[in-house]
Image (spheres, coloured by chain):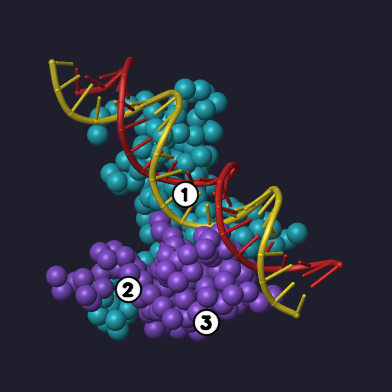
Chain colours: A purple, B cyan, C yellow, D red
Amino acid sequence: MKYSKQRELVLNTVMENPVHPTADFVYSHLRNANPNISLGTVYRNLNLLVEHGFIHKIAIPNGSDRFDFRLDEHYHMICNSCGEVFDVELNRLKELDTEIEKSTGFIVTGHDLIINGVCNNCKNK
Amino acid sequence: MKYSKQRELVLNTVMENPVHPTADFVYSHLRNANPNISLGTVYRNLNLLVEHGFIHKIAIPNGSDRFDFRLDEHYHMICNSCGEVFDVELNRLKELDTEIEKSTGFIVTGHDLIINGVCNNCKNK
DNA sequence: CTACCTGCAAAAGGTTTGCATAGCC
DNA sequence: GGCTATGCAAACCTTTTGCAGGTAG
């Protein structure tokens, strides 16, 4: 992967924003200082960074994909009130994969888990 | 909810096809015998049937929504090779919700879990 | 009769892609 | 110089929606 200014900017934006930014967040954020950057480039670079293991992609049911600079295993919760995505400090449920592998015979490569709920800010309103 | 022929057809299609059909599957399936049915109507009825609790919607990460006539609690596995969706007979992980509720303070209303892997048909190739 | 439903087509997200040009190595 | 990346815009896919006419109760 050869260097590009745009890729560096995209990576930095994800690194500096623990809000699990969407592609559009990254784009809007960067547009301020870089009016010429294009949304296509942002998407291409996010996907490249995911493929090369620099960041992770979080698929949100009925929502835009989000990106995460944290590479260690953890889960995510989405607040159905404000829409924000929070980290959930819980180790990957490996037993779950093994259990399902045993009972179904399928080769289990992993799982996607998103917790739904209401965050601390929103529940106090 | 007042009776309509189209809604009946949509519901029957989901009932008779344990493949967890997508909206487009239902539409194509029905078009054969009902060339005038519209995709919009299929979507509207699927959503209505979900809202009224007749069927469930399964959100697939990076894929179309699927619909399920089974109302009892279970999970789903998607085969990354053939794309088919299978039932996983595993009781809902209520403990998980409670655990996360305790550790985070969030109100947890539920979770979306999709298992990824390779199904029995595909792994033997 | 009236409220709800349909078909059709357009619009609305979100994401990818083709193309000509620009930039890294 | 060659290969990769960019900007721009168009295309794509899935899902929703506005509208005018149709149908159940």
Q: Chain of mark 2?
A: B
Q: Do tags 2 and 3 sit on the same chain?
A: no
**Given contact means CB atoms under 8 Å apart, are the residues at marks 2 and 3 in contact?**
no
Element at badge 1?
strand
- Residue type of the residue flagged with mark 1: Arg
Q: Which residue is mark 2?
A: B97
Element at badge 3?
loop
Residue A100 in view in this figure: no
Residue B18 location, x and y as percent?
Answer: 50, 46
In front here: A6 or A115? A6
Ranked by sequence position, the earlier of labels 1 and 2 is 1
Apparent side of residue B83 relative to residue C24 in the rendered image (left or right): left
Element at badge 2?
helix
- Residue type of the residue flagged with mark 3: Leu
* Mark 3 neighbour class, 10 Å CA radius: few under 14, some 14 to 19, many 20 or more: few
**Given contact means CB atoms under 8 Å apart, are the residues at marks 3 and 1 in contact?**
no
* Mark 1 neighbour class, 10 Å CA radius: few under 14, some 14 to 19, many 20 or more: many
